[in-house]
Image (cartoon, grey):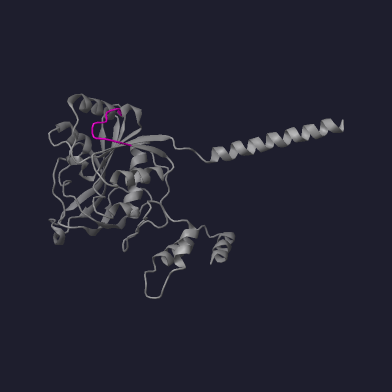
Amino acid sequence: MKKNIVSHIKSLQYLLAMAMVLMFSQCKKPASLNAVIISDQKGETSENIKSILVNTGLFDADIKGNTFSNFKGYDLVILNLQKGEWGADVKTDFTNYVKSGGGVVVMNTAANAFADWGDFAEISGVKPSESKSKDEFEYEVMSRNVEHPVTKGLPTNWIHTSDYLLFNTKSLDGEIEVLASAKADTLHGGGGEILPVLFTVKYGEGRVFNTTMGTGAMANQCVGFITTLQRGAEWAATGVVSQEVSVDFPNSVSTHEWTDFKPLTLDEILKKCETYEVGKSKKYLNDFSMRIRNCDGKPETYAMYEAKI
């Protein structure tokens, strides 16, 4: 009898352990969306875009060359092209992919990749144009639709890290919804206009997200660029956005960068604070202060921060 009871207890313990394993394995959700980055650009640009997507935990991402055409195998197609080399069949397949509900992200200058393809201007929302600012500069991004899933919860005004401003959005084509704009500063070759920098396009049943940001040397490290690309990609693929806005998102007076395209952990921030010298940058000290200011306010959370300090 005693043996049976012990055996029964062990069985219950095993079942409980298995249930706990199952529960915790379900808490960590695997990436559920597949993205393909189509690129003809050398260097790290497409690898950076891949890292930005994968860091959401929502996407797996592949990088393919200019002539890739298996769009149907993916939830999202990201165009990072300078010059498209698609034949008529591939163009038709892409148009059908978007019309039937495919998600697309058009990266900055990719709008110029198909200058001789009229339908693409309607898909991307932009007519081809090489016009841009004469140099890189920090500019203020102004939200135009604060209720759209991509921009909801973001500051209404924030500063983007030094970047080129594209002037190709003076005239948009198709069913457009402008999400954010920036001023084409005359000091940097602009005409003073307020130009869209983030917008969406509806094409058939498809969703297209277009960002003109990210052409500058360090611009893709901007938290604003990373966040809007991540949220725009999720929206284009699914129609919704589940991602929270980071506490260190840029504001109306300062920029913020993630050098590895993701926020530092609290321990990583404190490790960098150890090297602070009076008169040097207070970036990581400010990051730590921001974490405290934006925490949940619970006594145990403050106690944790106190212990870390």
Which percent across, then down, holds residue 220?
A: 30, 51
Residue at far right of view: 1
* Residue nearer the viewer, 194 or 137: 137
Above or below 174: residue 47? below
* Residue nearer the viewer, 88 or 296: 88
Above or below 204: residue 211? below
Residue at the (73%, 34%) spot, across then down: 12
Would residue 294 be seen by someone viewing this image from the given angle?
no
Quadrant in which residue 57 is drawn = top left
Residue at the (72%, 37%) spot, across then down: 13
Residue 13 is left or right of residue 220, and the answer is right
Residue at the (33%, 43%) spot, across then down: 232
Which percent across, then down, holds residue 119?
A: 17, 31
Which percent across, then down, holds residue 174?
A: 20, 36
Was residue 67 drawn as part of the magenta stretch in this picture? yes
Quadrant in which residue 280 is drawn = bottom left
How many numbered marks are there? 0
Q: What is the magenta range? A: 63-70
Quarter of the image with the N terminus is: top right
Majority SS type along the magenta span: loop
Residue 251 is left or right of residue 275, and the answer is left
